[in-house]
């Protein structure tokens, strides 16, 4: 390669980094830290945290750290709260009608403190894989992306998903993506029980995992077949439908508005999921977007939306504001919350993700989830655990998810006291990924009007 091209590329990549983040190869000492570590334990105050080579090296109460190198950068975090980088467990790189928003979405995730995502189903797995690699190499900015294979469903299901023609077709398709490095697959609402069993067998044989947005298969059936994760919780529960046929996504969903969530049957279903080590992913913010009288777009996201999406949002909001106040969806939200709360309190592994849409933006929706988890009754530390440490557990990752010695320095500095004010979650000063700082203001400035332009 000619030398002028090499220097151009160096400048280009250096430029990408320079625009958004400040490279921190130096050690970093955080002083006067109040932090929530992501394990579910109480917030700690007056700590010092030393970061070396992108890893939490030392975490001590008060600051009597000696022998600091002269090039150690010191940051005083008095009045701030730090939390681990968020692990978005249902964080697609596409939204309805817009299959190619990956590059913008990944910047929105990072700017919102989401430092790792599992995409939970891909419309274009090859694009996800290449974006994940470019981010890993530092050619683009974004969270660490753990990509997914294509959605797998059954006859009658969405046509842009894999509908197995026979066993060989299914196996060959999965093997193709496994060869590309995919380790996570998502099954969708029309999957046939026998296909689900087959998919799980192939996946587990190849050290891969299966998650499901279920309907044709009940939570209990899927748990007993060995599924790893179940999406959306209560809203896609079909276990107690009286008019459902085995293996079909049919029957009325109205029953979920009257089902007794505290009943022994529901508890024993949750216990089965827990015994079978099935995690559940909460996606409250996207459900909230369908409820009249609830704020369903963060005002800070309006400048980021394309004119087309902004118009769509305004007309939708006007329509919803005029709707006669019908409490069905509001009450259902409370029931979805209750189901998740019970699962967590019984010992279940509850994670969270945004399942972004046209008006619930990547990242911003993850942060809204926090406020909704608080509304569901979780304590601050529990909500943060659901959004961070629990995601790492579901991903079988011991290097991320919590602020503990030896873990990767992925964390978020919030401007204020999160314990006293929930909305502090949306006041992000800086996001650190692998010990490198990214500034949301700079990232978002470059995304004006870009969400939904393709
Ligand atoms: Zn989804």
Image: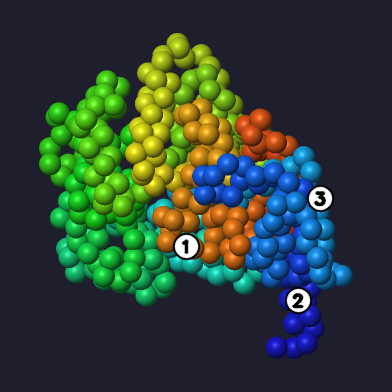
Which one is closest to the eye, mark 2 or mark 3?
3
According to the picture, the residue beneath numbered tag 1 turns out to be 397
Coloration mode: rainbow
According to the picture, the residue beneath numbered tag 2 turns out to be 10
Neighbours of disc 1 within 10 Å: few (<14), some (14-19), many (20+): few
Horizontal relation, residue 251 to residue 149: left or right: left
According to the picture, the residue beneath numbered tag 3 turns out to be 76
Of the two numbered discs 2 and 3 on the same chain, state the one appearing first in sequence: 2
In the rendered image, the residue lying farthest to the bottom is 2
**Numbered marks: total:** 3
Which residue sits at x=26%, y=49%? 275
Using the image, determine if residue 68 lies above or below residue 265. below
Which residue sits at x=44%, y=39%? 283
Of the two numbered discs 2 and 1 on the same chain, state the one appearing first in sequence: 2
Q: Label 2, secondary structure: give it.
A: helix
- Tag on residue 114? none
Horizontal relation, residue 247 to residue 186: left or right: left
């Amino acid at each position: 390669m000619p030398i002028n091209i090499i220097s151009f590329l160096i400048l280009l990549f250096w430029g990408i980094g320079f625009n958004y983040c400040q490279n921190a190869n130096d050690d970093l000492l955080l002083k006067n830290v109040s932090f929530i570590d992501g394990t579910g334990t109480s917030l700690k105050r007056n700590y010092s945290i030393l970061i070396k080579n992108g890893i939490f090296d030392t975490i001590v109460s008060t600051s009597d750290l000696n022998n600091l190198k002269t090039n150690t950068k010191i940051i005083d975090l008095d009045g701030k709260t730090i939390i681990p980088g968020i692990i978005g467990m249902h964080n697609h790189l596409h939204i309805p009608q817009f299959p190619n928003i990956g590059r913008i979405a990944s910047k929105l995730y990072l700017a919102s403190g989401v430092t790792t995502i599992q995409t939970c189903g891909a419309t274009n797995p090859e694009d996800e894989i290449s974006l994940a690699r470019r981010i890993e190499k530092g050619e683009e900015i974004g969270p660490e992306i753990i990509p997914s294979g294509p959605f797998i469903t059954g006859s009658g299901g969405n046509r842009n998903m894999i509908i197995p023609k026979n066993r060989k077709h299914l196996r060959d398709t999965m093997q193709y993506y496994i060869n590309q490095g995919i380790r996570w697959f998502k099954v969708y609402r029309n999957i046939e029980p026998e296909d689900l069993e087959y998919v799980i067998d192939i996946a587990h044989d190849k050290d891969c995992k299966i998650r499901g947005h279920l309907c044709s298969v009940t939570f209990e059936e899927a748990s007993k077949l060995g599924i790893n994760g179940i999406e959306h919780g209560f809203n896609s529960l079909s276990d107690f439908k009286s008019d459902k046929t085995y293996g079909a996504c049919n029957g009325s969903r109205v029953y979920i508005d009257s089902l007794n969530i505290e009943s022994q049957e529901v508890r024993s279903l949750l216990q089965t999921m827990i015994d079978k080590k099935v995690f559940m992913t909460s996606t409250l913010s996207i459900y909230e977007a369908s409820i009249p009288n609830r704020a369903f777009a963060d005002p800070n996201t309006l400048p980021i939306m394309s004119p087309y999406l902004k118009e769509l949002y305004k007309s939708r909001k006007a329509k919803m504001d005029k709707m006669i106040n019908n409490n069905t969806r509001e009450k259902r939200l409370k029931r979805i919350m209750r189901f998740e709360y019970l699962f967590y309190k019984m010992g279940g592994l509850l994670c969270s993700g945004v399942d972004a849409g046209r008006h619930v933006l990547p990242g911003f929706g993850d942060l809204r989830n926090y406020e909704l988890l608080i509304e569901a009754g979780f304590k601050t530390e529990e909500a943060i655990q659901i959004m961070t440490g629990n995601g790492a557990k579901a991903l079988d990752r011991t290097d991320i998810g919590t602020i503990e010695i030896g873990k990767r320095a992925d964390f978020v500095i919030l401007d204020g006291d999160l314990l006293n004010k929930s909305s502090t979650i949306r006041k992000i000063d800086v996001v650190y990924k692998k010990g490198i700082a990214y500034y949301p203001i700079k990232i978002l400035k470059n995304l004006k009007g870009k969400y939904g332009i393709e």
